[in-house]
Image (tube, rainbow, N blue to C red):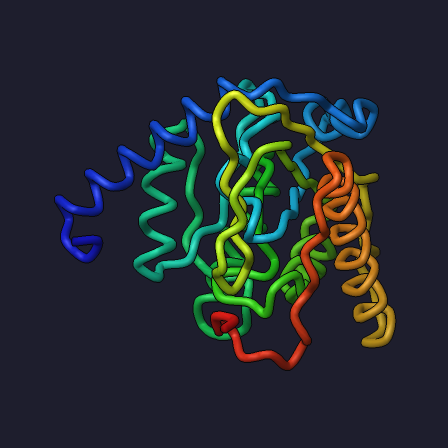
Amino acid sequence: MLRSETGSAVVSWVLAKFIWLTARSIRWQMATPAFHAKATKLNQPIIAVFWHSRIIQMGAGWRESKPIAMLQSPHPDGKLIARAIQRLGYQTIWGSSTKGKGGAAGLRNMIKALRGGMSVGITPDGPRGPRMRLSVGVVAMARLSGAPVMPVAWNVKHRKVLRTWDRMLLARPFSRGVVFWGEPIYVPKTLTPEEFEGYRLMIETRLTEITDQADLHFGHQPTTPAEPAEEPGKRDR
């Protein structure tokens, strides 16, 4: 059904409505208002990074008047999510955060959008993992564009954690929610290979830290990152 044009259109419409209605039923709190203000009011575009498990309600707390585009994989699942977020008013950039032809195209398109003044959102462990491991594309994008990287995570008190490779988080309607933004991270234009890896680890660590803070805010057990060498997209038994 998802492979057909009609089926994809129907499911994406239902998914968009679910996201929209759920988001508006939740009482959201900005746990880091100073960084949230920077994210939505900086006079330059930003690179918002969030783990793939938080993609469903990632629009919470974003100022609708500030344009943002989301990187989406051309994989059928990515296309479904892309159609849903387009219905919610976000633009889509096709590509991948991983190495390969799709990753190179995605990187070029994201840099073009940033240089044009549009902020971008990216799941640096998507589309298939390893879970909560940052791809090199984020550092390259920040270095070439000059845009700051800002980690962000959300959580809700009442939720469902799916047994997918990313531990996808589903918010239950009429819950209480919280959004954490991290401090902007600027990547220099010139980096040695060692410095490049240092920034990759820094962004990965900070994103995991604020995601853990969001989980602990409601007393939930933080999600454990996958081993770096774990098979992408593998479902735990």
Report the residue at 35% width, 32% height from top: 16
Q: Residue 128: where, in percent of width, then height? A: 49, 66
Total residue callouts: 0
Q: Which one is in front, 20 or 76?
A: 20
Q: Is residue 117 above or below residue 197?
A: above
Residue 168, given in percent of the width and then of the height, sits at: 52, 51
Taking the image as shown, residue 179 lies to the left or right of residue 65, namely: right
Q: Is residue 95 left or right of residue 191?
A: left
At a point 42% along the width and 31% down the height, the residue shown is 19
Residue 50 placement, left or right of 83: right
Q: Residue at x 15, y 48 (%)?
A: 5
Q: Position of residue 67 (x, y in %)?
A: 53, 28
Q: Is residue 12 above or below residue 233?
A: above
| Position above or below: 24 against 2 | above
Task: Please state which of residues 46 and 132 is positioned toward the viewer in this rendering.
Answer: 132
Instruction: Decide if residue 136 is in sight here.
Output: no
Q: Nearer the viewer, residue 102 or 51?
A: 51
Which percent across, then down, holds residue 61? 62, 25
Q: Residue at x 64, y 27 (%)?
A: 177
Residue 178 shows in the view: yes
